[in-house]
Image (tube, grey):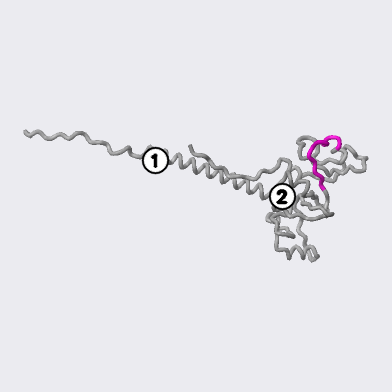
Amino acid sequence: MMLRRVASSTPVPEWLEALLTTRFFLACGAHPASPRNECNMFCLDCRGAPPPAFCYYCRAHRHASHRVIQIRRSSYHDVVRVSEVEDVLDITGVQTYVINSARVLFLNERPQPRGAGAAAGKAAASPYNCEICGRALLDPFRFCSLGCKLVDTKRSNGHAAAAADGGAANEEAEEVGGSKNAAARPQGRRRKGIPHRAPFWS
């Protein structure tokens, strides 16, 4: 019996895509009159109907014993602290930044600076770029955000699955071809009958 070798793929947490597509910093509908009602929290354990983003008060009421991360803002873009996700998510290759003395990651791709400003000039001079969106990076990382890394992971997993399926198809074709060849192969030379001498009187 032949063992099929399946190409390995990188697992993606179920909550990651929800995190990257959630709108944060909207006012909480359950606590409209409260001072800290912006929805900047995300639960890694909850699934289903409740909105993925919630406020400080919702956390105390519904997520007290859950794994919760806080989303922050930098230049109008959502970021998360490395210390909050490094134990539950593979962040290898993603550019990190230090903001307010904390190392953070951007959740999604950001537009590349354009024009003649200092930011655009720095971007043009950078030797490092995101492999997905091409954004200039400060250091030799592969991706500018968790979103871009997710795109690469899905692409790699798709190639791995295709390679595994292709290998299995080739193995099956070889097995079928081998069985046909075995059936068509002659089973040795057939032995001739015992020869008889012609009678002396012929």
Q: Quadrant of residue 116?
A: bottom right
> Residue 53: which numbered mark, if any?
none
The kind of residue tagged 1 is Asn
- Reading the image, the residue beneath label 2 is 91
Please indicate whether residue 161 sits to the left or right of residue 38 in the image: left
Residue at the (79%, 50%) spot, across then down = 79
Total labels: the figure holds 2
Residue 140 % position (x, y): 70, 59
Residue 118 % position (x, y): 80, 65
Residue at the (73%, 44%) spot, across then down = 88
Image: magenta residue range: 60-71
Residue 63 part of the magenta segment: yes
Using the image as rendered, state which of residue 12 and residue 200 is in the foreground: 12
Please indicate whether residue 6 sits to the left or right of residue 115 in the image: left
Q: Quadrant of residue 56?
A: top right
Secondary structure beneath dot 1 equals helix
Residue 39 % position (x, y): 85, 43
- Reading the image, the residue beneath label 1 is 181
Placement of 30 over or under 97, stated as above or below: above
The kind of residue tagged 2 is Ile
Secondary structure beneath dot 2 equals loop
